[in-house]
Amino acid sequence: MKRLSILILLLSLPAALFSDYVDIADVLKETGSSLEYDTLLESGMLASGRTRVSFTVNAPWIIVNDGVKLSTPGIRREKGRLLIPEETAAKIIGVFRGDESPGRVFRVGAIVIDPGHGGRDSGASYTHTVNGKKVRISEKDVVLKAGFMLYELLKKRFPDKVVLMTRTRDVTLSLEERPEIANSISLGEDEAIIYISLHANASLSGTARGFEVWYLTATYKRNLLSTASVDSEYHDILPIMNSMQDEEFTRESILLARSIMQQLETAVGKETENRGLKEGEWLVVRKAKMPSILIELGFLSNRDEALKLASDEYLQKLSFAIYNGVSSFIEKFEQSNAFTE
């Protein structure tokens, strides 16, 4: 039955693939994958979504999804071209079609909510006059309350997932400690984690208002993997694996940010300004080894918006919008098997 499946697969390929060796460009086109190749190490990786096939020139194997080694005739390099034996090409294409897949099912296993500041660090803090009385509104309090609201919503919706807050009281956490809490969560092999940092904004202008959603700029490259975190047989292709992982997290961060932004616009777009999606190099998202975003809920320097942010009613709107955005992202992530289908 297996031989028949391979034969049917070969017959379904374009005529350009029928020869002793095929050019890797044909396999990339057939699978819709991208290629990263290190000419010094003579190792490469084809990737589409979370499906990966790694190889080393002349090695009699390919590695699927960083874990399953399949014996295959070796890939050759001639005159700058990568040539793949017909049998190997069939297996690679089968992996991306699901025929050779080890049957991995990806899911979001954990959600980390990080209310910014706390303790000695109040964040943005402003005093506004209300009915003749001065009211002090601090960022650390606003985002902690919003974090609790979001936590309760997510915990109820996803009882099978770990939902964690980096702080649940008025304590000081360093910027390094926050993402490290998320990075230290133990997950299953095919589980993902997302990181949501909550903040409130401030400006020299008292009229600035609105919400923003930030993600890590694509030009910033994180070191996500180390020789200690992968098997020795993958050390030769570690730089390629790291680059692919980083691109994957950046893409998923953008999708998460878009999902939340759409829901915020729906919930409060008529009450305040949608300041859009933004790229930045905030330390907490730089250090998070996962899809990560930072949300600015509004401006405490704006009296009217600060008073809204201090009210449970408006915070509930914001929290519910973020919850809807996260839920939509998770649903799409899991239904598409981490955007691979």
Image: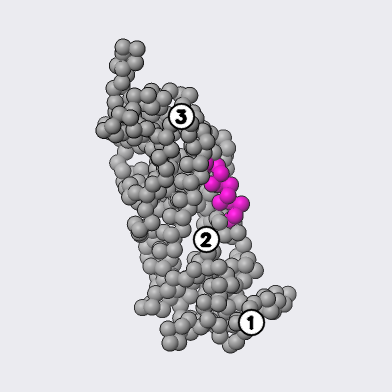
Q: Secondary structure at mark 2?
A: loop
Magenta stretch: includes residue 335: yes
Residue 139 seen from this side: no
Residue for badge 2: 50
The amino acid type of the residue labelled 3 equals Glu
| Quarter occupied by residue 43 | bottom left
Residue drawn 34% across and 57% down?
220
**Measured from the top left, where is residue 216 in percent x and y?**
38, 51
Circle 2 crowding by C-alpha within 10 Å: few under 14, some 14–19, many from 20: some
Q: Nearer the viewer, mark 1 or mark 3?
A: 3
Q: Nearer the viewer, mark 2 or mark 1?
A: 1
Residue drawn 62% across and 67% down?
97
Residue for badge 3: 271
**Residue 217: which numbered mark, if any?**
none
**Measured from the top left, where is residue 322 in percent x and y?**
49, 38
Pick whichever of labels 1 and 3 is earlier in the sequence.
1
Task: Estimate the spatial distance between the alpha carbons at disc 2 and disc 1, rounded to whole Å.
Answer: 28 Å
Protein image colouring = one colour
**Measured from the top left, where is residue 197 in percent x and y?**
40, 41
Q: Secondary structure at mark 1?
A: helix
**Residue 15: which numbered mark, if any?**
1
The amino acid type of the residue labelled 2 equals Arg
The amino acid type of the residue labelled 1 equals Ala
Q: Secondary structure at mark 3?
A: loop
Q: How many numbered circles are shown?
A: 3
